[in-house]
Amino acid sequence: AVSVVIPGAVLYLPLEDLIDREKEIERLTKEQERLTKEIARCEGMLNNQNFVNKAPAAKVEAEKEKLEKYKEMIKLVESFTANGGDKVSVMANVTAVMKMTFPETFFWVGFYVVKDNVLLVGPFQGTPACMMIKYGKGVCGTAWERRETLIVPDVELFDGHIACSSLSRSEIVVPVMLDGEVVAEIDIDSTDVASFDETDRTYLEEVAAMVAPYFGQNS
């Protein structure tokens, strides 16, 4: 539901009858097609001999390894998002898959869920987290406000960063969109600076698109 604050009252509007399920499925399908093209572009870059020759060998190998890990991760996420269930159990399993795939890079990984005009912490793996984040505040709140993925190479340089853990040095936040609105977010932190790039964005946005339909259910 969406809550609307007016002087002296708070109105709660159920979204169930406001979301056109077929149109949302169509939108998500198009988004998945876009992401598939972006993945192909990344793979093409790594298969481009000119790029490989110019880039440091270690960097090329690291990117190839990351792509392979993401491909396997997407397969596992698909297995948990294709068989039904409620959104909490889906988020819990998807979080476990992400953490399992990148145990060293993903220091903290999990979901924040939009409820009553704030982000509330959902299933996660890592150190204790901030329970609630306001709209427009910190990296998560800003990603919600902008309705776009945010990659922060150094959280200490991000104006208004909320330090849920002093160990966090870089972060990526990916909104989960349903019917044009942010309903949740994937939040991932690393203990190293500049841990996330466009490859992470591409695959994590695909994960968000697969999870999104569960927020249109009464679960």
Image (tube, helix red, strand yellow):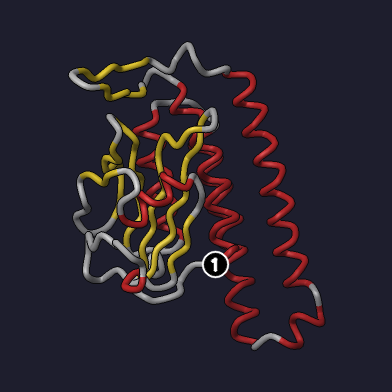
Q: Which residue is outermost to the right?
A: 49
Residue that appears at 36% across and 57% down = 139
> Mark 1 = which residue?
197
Q: In which quadrant is the N terminus drawn? A: top left
Residue that appears at 70% across and 55% down = 38
The location of residue 204, given as percent across then percent down, is 52, 52
The location of residue 186, given as percent across then percent down, is 41, 48
Is 11 situated above or below 95? above
Q: Quadrant of residue 32?
A: top right
Bin the neighbour count of mark 1 within 10 Å (Cα to Cα): few under 14, some 14-19, many 20 and up.
Answer: few
The location of residue 180, given as percent across then percent down, is 54, 32
Q: Which residue is outermost to the front?
A: 7
The location of residue 72, given as percent across then percent down, is 57, 54
Residue that appears at 57% across and 49% down = 74
Is 187 situated above or below 27? below
**Disc 1 secondary structure class:** loop
**Which of 150/97 is in front?**
150
Q: In this image, 100 relative to 56: left or right?
A: left
Q: Amino acid at mark 1?
A: Asp
Q: In this image, 33 relative to 22: left or right?
A: right
> How many marks overall?
1
Q: In this image, 35 relative to 104: left or right?
A: right
**Which of 24/116 is in front?**
116
Q: In which quadrant is the C terminus drawn? A: top left
Q: In this image, 26 relative to 113: left or right?
A: right
Is 28 situated above or below 61? above
**Which of 105/183 is in front?**
183
Q: Which residue is outermost to the top?
A: 17
Residue that appears at 19% across and 55% down = 128
Q: Quadrant of residue 39?
A: bottom right
